[in-house]
Amino acid sequence: MINNSINPKGILFLLFLFLTVAGMAQKKARLLVFCKTAGYHHSSIETGKIAVLKLGKENGFDVDTTSKADLFTKKGLKNYQAVVFLSTTGDVLNAEQQTAFQEYIQSGGGFVGVHAATDTEYEWPWFGDLVGAYFAKHPEQQTAVLNVIDKNSLATSHLPDQWERKDEWYNFKWMTKAPLHVLITIDEDSYDAGLAKMGDYHPMSWYHDFDGGRSFYTALGHTEESYVDPLFLKHLLGGVQYALGTKKMK
């Protein structure tokens, strides 16, 4: 004899399982914007945070922002697919926080460095390799010409071959020996680069897979005007999506 009775507990279990799977499928990527400064504090940080929050809302990822390093623990970082260092400066993480962040990247996390991220953690060589360079000097803000040398990427496909804009142009005193995929260079003949010139090959934006994770850096973004510039915002968005792992750079 066939039992046609319905088991309420079984139905509840199946419903719970369905909702759990559906919730996992719809879970958004989450980005942490970190903007602690132990040195110079850029006024553009506030407009930058607002801009990234807007990018998240428009492109399907969640964004948290903080100027404190308390989240740099194994438990705190596991909630994020990528971390943006938004014009951070100086020594912003203690030894335990550095270890947690390094393990986070090694576990497949993503990193985005914006502008002064290269003016950060000079005494931590692993971070220098992650971001790709350390800041040296910069001349006064001025208009210059950027050469987009790779237009086949999320961060550059929308840009003109030569991109003229005003910003604070960094010179770098050290570039990592790890392979970097450079996207943008700057034409030093188009502006007064000051005393610390880098010469004909002066990278300004790049990315690389590093130590198990993903890293994107742009030296642009000093000015508040950058964060209402559609070209810059799409450039930044491409780097964020690559770091989150939601899209491939190429």
Image (spheres, rainbow, N blue to C red):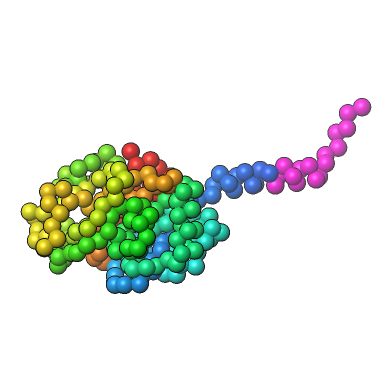
Instruction: Give the x, y percent position of residue 60.
Output: 44, 51
Indicate left or right for 98 with 166 as reference: right
Give me the residue at 15% from left, 54% from top. Answer: 198
Q: Nearer the viewer, residue 102 or 87?
A: 102
Q: Specify the quadrant that holds the C terminus.
A: top left
Rendered image quadrant of residue 189 = bottom left
Q: Residue furthest right?
A: 1
Indicate left or right for 71 with 67 as reference: right
Indicate left or right for 233 with 63 as reference: left
Instruction: Give the x, y percent position of residue 115.
Output: 28, 60
Give me the residue at 85% from left, 33% from top. Answer: 4
Q: Residue furthest top?
A: 1
Above/below status of 144 relative to 89: above
Q: Residue furthest left?
A: 189
- 224 magenta-colored: no
Residue 216 in view of the camera: yes
Q: Specify the quadrant that holds the N terminus.
A: top right
Magenta segment boundaries in residue numbering: 1-16
Residue 225 in view of the camera: no
Above/below status of 2 relative to 241: above
Instruction: Give the x, y percent position of residue 160.
Output: 18, 46
Give me the residue at 45% from left, 70% from top. Answer: 68
Indicate left or right for 106 with 226 as reference: right
- 10 magenta-colored: yes
Instruction: Give the x, y percent position of residue 165.
Output: 16, 57
Rendered image quadrant of residue 7 = top right
